[in-house]
Amino acid sequence: MIAAAPNELPTPYLRIGSERLYTASGGTFRHASPYDSTLQTDVPMAGPAEIQAAVAAAAGAADDWRFWRPEARRAALHRLASLIREHREEFGRLSAIDNGMPLAMGLGGVDLTAEWHDYYAGWCDKIDGQMLSSFGTRGSFSYTSPEPYAVVGVILTWNGPLVSLGMSVAAPLAAGCTVVVKPSEMTPHSARLYGELASQAGIPDGVLNIVSGGPDAGDALVRHPLVEKISFVGGPTTAQKILVACAERFKPSLMELGGKSACLVFPDADDIDSIAQRAAFAAFGKMSGQACAIPTRLVVHEDLHDDVVKRVCEIAAGYTLGDPLDPATRMGPVIHAGAQQRILESVDRAVQDGAGRVVLGGTNPGGDLADKPFVRPTVLVDVDPQHDIAQTEVFGPVLLVFRFREEDEAIALANGTDYGLAAYIESRDVDRVHRVAERLKAGGVYVNGATTIVPHTPYGGLGISGFGKQGARTGLDEFLRYKTVSIL
Ligand code: NAD
């Protein structure tokens, strides 16, 4: 069923303490669904004044929230998880309207986000320190006391309207931090509903503040002296600016940045159809290639190369492109016309430079979609690994295929960029899997399957893909400082 008209959508607002602001000093962003530009909402944009107010609200709520009984905090996060599940359909629809993500993808994201909250709810009453008694004096010992950062500033990009928000907020809330989130102005609807559900779940005003805004608002949040830690999801160039601003106050940060992940396909891999299905879904079906950890480089043994390429192209050519709200759609638009142009230009440039050959796509699909920001699933072969298209994240439905003969060559190709978010191995040879996994430069290695972002495993990159982890106990510790108390 195609969803109700977006003009029935509630208007987004800034959530600051108990205030709900429909206008703000940073002006207004006219939000249009990437699929249908007539669907518009006015998003109030925070300026420095609203950031100041949001941080003050978070700082004011910090002491109370930190000392909530752990079982009460746990119950509130479980309630939020349940409410997210209860609003599954609505969140799926809002994600599609926010950024053009196909309904099925959005619904999957809702389930993951709910799981993430249940998982971190479980940590609320298990936050512990250590007792260390290795001193030479009788009665001397030390203990470590975990203390939450008072105010955490969360800055998000647009590609996971609900998932990125939930993944970035659940752990600091469980740790006892208060939070100011600056989501992207391009995803206002999911953020509004999430904030409302947090209130319904009993999370007090001031503990979670949500303020849309642009780079200036983000910068004001990073530089605010009461914001003690930054958690950022976005691109490496923005991350560098944030890191410079953080340096002014020695502010720690968690950086979840871009990727250029490779999938190595060895001759002892699964059948070609399974590999090709996974590769096509990751590169095209998952958010039109606008996802951080997907394998965008396929590194295939020469014995399988041609068959894999042929099958990936057949599968991708069969994808239904269209309205993200239509359940039959396998691939939606890219975020906006500017992104479409950037993606198509990067493909054209590679071809003109003789750095790759297009065997599928490379154009707008035309027809009914000609005036919309779509890019056909695009596959390039014979790619020059040093060319910009092979070195920089395209963030669109573009899959690059490389050929190798020896294992060392495959590893060198996989490790041959500055990124290090994820890597994939397709092989049923257990010795090879462990040997290659150990040598891959990536925060996560996924074997014979797609990216598995689940709350009980750590997720995060290295190199220009960032540092720090979301997920697992590690993801909780990101928001705790351990004080050592020594009795001498
Ligand atoms: P971006 O870096 O341009 O913007 C992200 C956010 O930063 C926005 O909210 C923006 O307003 C804010 N911002 C911009 N300038 C700022 C400044 N100077 N100070 C503070 N905040 C500022 O986002 P993008 O490049 O469009 O995002 C896409 C990137 O995000 C891709 O590289 C993608 O791979 C990455 N990503 C990573 C993950 C992950 O978990 N590793 C998840 C999703 C997306």
Image (spheres, rainbow, N blue to C red):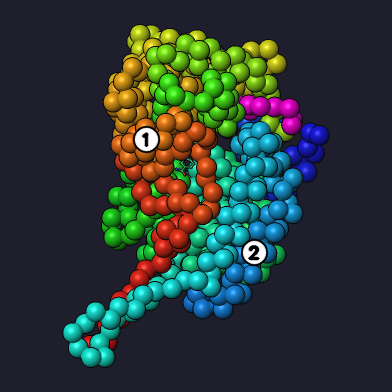
Asked whether residue 13 appears in the rendered view, the answer is no
At mark 1, the secondary structure is: helix
Which residue is found at the position 57% from the left and 25% from the top? Answer: 274
Which residues fall within the magenta stretch?
Answer: 326-334
Relative horizontal placement of residue 125, taking residue 401 as reference (left or right) = right
Predominant secondary structure in magenta? loop
Left or right: 329 in relation to 66: right
Q: Which residue is mark 1?
A: 431
Outermost residue toward the left in this view: 136
Identify the residue under disc 2: 78
Residue 129: which quarter of the image? bottom left
Foreground tag (1 vs 2)? 1
Three-letter code, disc 1: Asp
Image quadrant holding the N terminus, namely top right
Q: Horizontal and vertical percent for residue 235?
A: 41, 39
Front residue (pair 194, 313): 313
| Residue sitting at x 50%, y 33% | 448
Residue at 71% from the left image edge and 58% from the top image edge: 83
